Image (cartoon, coloured by chain):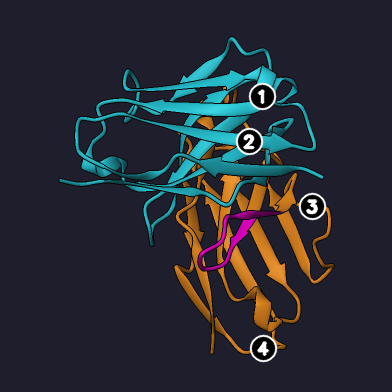
Amino acid sequence: EIVMTQSPATLSVSPGERATLSCRASQYVSSNLAWFQQKPGQAPRLLIYGASTRATGIPARFSGSGSGTEFTLTISSLQSEDFAVYYCQQYNNWPPSEYTFGQGTKLEIK
Amino acid sequence: QVHLVESGGGMVLPGTSLTLSCAASGFTVSRYGMEWVRQVPGKGLQWVAIIWSDGNNKYYADSVKGRFTISRDDSNNTLLLQMNSLRAEDTAVYYCVKFRGRIAESWGQGTLVTVSS
């Protein structure tokens, strides 16, 4: 099983500042990496897939980068609605039962 | 527009059964891979069961294998999860998810299952 490790567990950032979240895979996953945002009481929402492609309707302040085993989600200028928990997920190997989530990074207001 | 609405959650006794439904609109369930993902309140995401678009390939997490069954009701464009022999550790919010290719693209709002005596 590919283990996804996200860091930090909690990130405190002020509104308007940049946030950088990391995700590391225990094995090579190419660019088969997605990021999800989850706000309290809501379902996860797809933000990024293919490591760097924004999903439909996702603002340009969200960007993803990386390939192989190291990935980054950057939020360029934090808005109040961006404070949430973020999960990465790799979907490199088949079958889909091999897809794995990271444990999440909580982005909180500083 | 894709819309997924889960139902069927509730509080049940250990050892009993429950069936979750996910009514889909805006697309045809039988043409896409679908899955159930669960989340213990305050914890992370865990996939539970997956049914691929061919309908024949089904996968289950080890923790639910032999107890849960994923299926589709194509006539009602609905995804189902039959859960038997429920345990306290099955307590979670269960989300219905639609794949686009390999990507978990669309999520329902979730339904809470509580297993408690």
Task: Check residue B23 in the rendering and tell me which mark sits there, or answer none.
Answer: 2
Looking at the picture, tell me which residue is in the foreground, B7 or A40. Answer: B7
Please name the residue that numbered disc 3 is placed on.
A55
Disc 1 crowd rating (10 Å Cα; few below 14, some 14-19, many 20+) is few
User: Which stretch did the figure color magenta?
Assistant: A36-46
Please name the residue that numbered disc 4 is placed on.
A15
Chain whose colour in the figure is cyan: B
Task: Check residue B76 in the rendering and tell me which mark sits there, or answer none.
Answer: 1
Q: Is residue A11 above or below residue B89?
A: below
State if disc 2 and disc 1 touch (CB < 8 Å): yes
Of mark 1 and mark 2, the one earlier in the sequence is 2
Determine the CA span between mark 1 and mark 3. 28 Å
Q: Residue at x 57, y 39 (%)?
A: B96
Residue B89 sits in quarter: top left
Q: Is residue B90 above or below residue A61?
A: above
Relative image position of residue A92 (x, y in whole percent): 63, 33
Query: Element type at marker 1?
Result: helix
Looking at the rendered structure, the number of numbered marks drawn on it comes to 4
What's the amino acid at mark 2? Answer: Ala
State if disc 3 and disc 4 touch (CB < 8 Å): no
Determine the CA span between mark 4 and mark 2. 38 Å
Residue B55 sits in quarter: top right
Q: Is residue A33 above or below residue A5?
A: above
Give the chain of mark 1: B
